[in-house]
């Protein structure tokens, strides 16, 4: 999910863009190259800069040297008085050198002008991209481009399917009507991350509509959405989305609604530290969203919730067993398997670790990390959107050794995106939660999973 991009000076520049040329020319040290590649996978701005620079180099390589239609050197030499040649061998050599460089300069200028003409033709469009070679760098650029295009298509679908009053109709798209607020919040999070991957004007309009809608869904007690057994899902996700929006916009109309929303989270926290269904005991699945909201609120300066946050994180940590798997309501409790629960709990632990955590902010121990990688290795083409979102986020907080698993999951998502027809740009709701969340659920979470980059996950807001 989004935050203010780390290392970004403004909306149009990234401080890493100066490394693009050096990276392509192999001028970076091994350490610098690894750091840049790690950043590149997460920064769509630098991905775009790298793609454009690579395309320009490719076009220049393909330009054939045009032969000069007329060799001016003989005629120029005829014009020079013959006596000049006899005065000094040095003068002769000097003039010959000057002439040689003049002719070369003219050839270079013609070549550059011809290359620019190829790069920017009269219709203002770039030429079609050639199929890239098997070079690993080319393959990586191709993957980045495919991911960027997939995100763009997904954002376009979300904008197109938003209702005029600002929400995404869960029932209309195959989900349960009680989740309309939560699905609208997930879609809002995807839009907040869209950046260069969408029509900026349309995305801004869609974001504003969604924010207004969510504010109107708050009850007198402070929770978002209908009062039902699923209240905390809707409320937690909506609170996270509005906190993210406030962190970017500093929109003062959100201060009171968010204050009431955070108070509701604190008052509904159960005695052991987690959250659950209205009449049930706490569980990991529901607790993740309230804890994400409390973490964001704390980083924005809300100090009164520190005790609630620490209590919640301590409860999440208590769910891990000796094998590194997190349970549902207690250790070893896996109603639908440990994979999704472990991914969610690991992500939370990594986000709110203490000052002694490593440079990635990661407090995931080796046992839990090994469990995450085992989970990722077992995943196949049977997508689980909810699990994959948290699994990708959890893996991203560890180290670059986990990148291969992230890349593998993201490739499957890109491959499974609908490419044609009325649902083009979306994802089919064909996982175990598809009948509850519908197409909006699948598309919003798949988009968020692909948007993983610096600034595209819930991280402490400065």
Image (tube, rainbow, N blue to C red):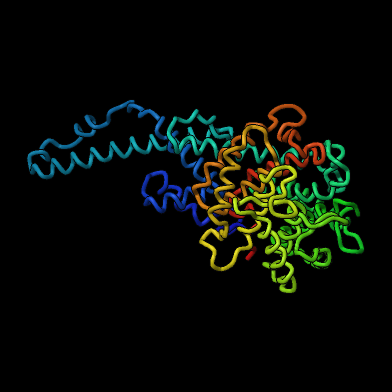
Residue 262 vs residue 417: left or right?
A: right
Q: Quadrant of the C terminus?
A: bottom right
Measured along the vertical axis of the image, is residue 244 above or below residue 450? Answer: below
Res. 372 in view: yes
Measured along the vertical axis of the image, is residue 73 above or below residue 260? Answer: above
Could you tell me how many numbered marks the image carries?
Answer: 0
Residue ID at (64%, 54%) = 321
Residue ID at (24%, 32%) = 73
Res. 45 in view: no
- Seen from the viewer's position, the closer of residues 376 and 14 is 376
Residue 284, horizontal then vertical, whole percent: 73, 54
Residue 409 vs residue 185: left or right?
A: left
Residue ID at (59%, 47%) = 372
Residue found at the very far bottom of the displayed protein: 304
Measured along the vertical axis of the image, is residue 434 above or below residue 340? Answer: above
Residue 256, horizontal then vertical, whole percent: 83, 67
Measured along the vertical axis of the image, is residue 58 above or below residue 395? Answer: above
- Seen from the viewer's position, the closer of residues 356 and 27 is 356
């Amino acid at each position: 999910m989004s935050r203010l991009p780390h290392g970004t000076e403004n909306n149009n520049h990234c401080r890493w863009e100066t490394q693009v040329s050096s990276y392509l020319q192999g001028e970076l040290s091994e350490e610098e190259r690894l750091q840049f590649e790690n950043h590149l996978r997460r920064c769509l701005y630098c991905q775009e800069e790298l793609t454009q620079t690579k395309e320009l180099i490719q076009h220049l390589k393909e330009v054939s040297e045009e032969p000069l239609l007329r060799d001016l050197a003989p005629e120029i030499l005829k014009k020079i008085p013959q006596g000049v040649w006899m005065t000094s061998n040095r003068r002769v050599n000097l003039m010959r050198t000057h002439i040689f460089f003049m002719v070369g300069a003219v050839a270079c200028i013609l070549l550059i002008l011809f290359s620019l003409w190829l790069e920017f033709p009269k219709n203002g469009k770039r030429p079609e991209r050639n199929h890239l070679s098997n070079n690993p760098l080319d393959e990586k650029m191709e993957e980045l481009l495919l991911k960027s295009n997939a995100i763009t298509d997904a954002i376009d679908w979300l904008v197109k399917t938003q209702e005029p009053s600002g929400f995404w109709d869960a029932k209309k798209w195959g989900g349960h009507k009680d989740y309309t607020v939560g699905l609208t919040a997930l879609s809002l999070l995807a839009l907040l991350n869209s950046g260069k991957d969408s029509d900026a004007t349309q995305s801004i309009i869609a974001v504003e509509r969604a924010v207004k809608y969510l504010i109107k869904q708050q009850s007198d007690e402070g929770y978002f959405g209908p009062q039902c057994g699923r209240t905390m899902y809707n409320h937690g996700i909506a609170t996270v989305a509005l906190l993210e929006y406030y962190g970017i916009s500093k929109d003062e109309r959100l201060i009171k609604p968010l204050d009431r929303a955070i108070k509701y989270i604190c008052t509904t926290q159960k005695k052991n530290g987690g959250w659950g269904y209205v009449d049930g005991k706490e569980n990991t699945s529901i607790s993740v969203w309230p804890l994400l909201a409390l973490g964001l609120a704390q980083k924005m300066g809300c100090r009164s919730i520190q005790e609630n946050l620490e209590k919640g994180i301590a409860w999440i940590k208590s769910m891990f067993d000796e094998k590194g798997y997190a349970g549902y309501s207690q250790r070893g409790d896996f109603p639908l398997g440990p994979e999704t629960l472990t991914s969610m709990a690991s992500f939370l632990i990594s986000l709110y670790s203490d000052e002694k955590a490593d440079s990635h902010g990661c407090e995931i121990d080796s046992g839990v990390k090994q469990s995450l990688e085992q989970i990722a290795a077992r995943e196949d083409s049977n997508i689980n959107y909810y699990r994959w979102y948290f699994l990708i986020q959890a893996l991203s907080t560890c180290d670059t050794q986990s990148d291969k698993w992230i890349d593998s999951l993201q490739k499957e998502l890109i491959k499974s995106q609908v490419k044609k027809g009325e649902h083009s740009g979306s994802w089919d709701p064909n996982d175990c939660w598809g009948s509850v969340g519908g197409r909006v659920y699948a598309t919003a979470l798949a988009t968020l999973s692909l948007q993983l980059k610096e600034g595209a996950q819930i991280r402490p807001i400065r």
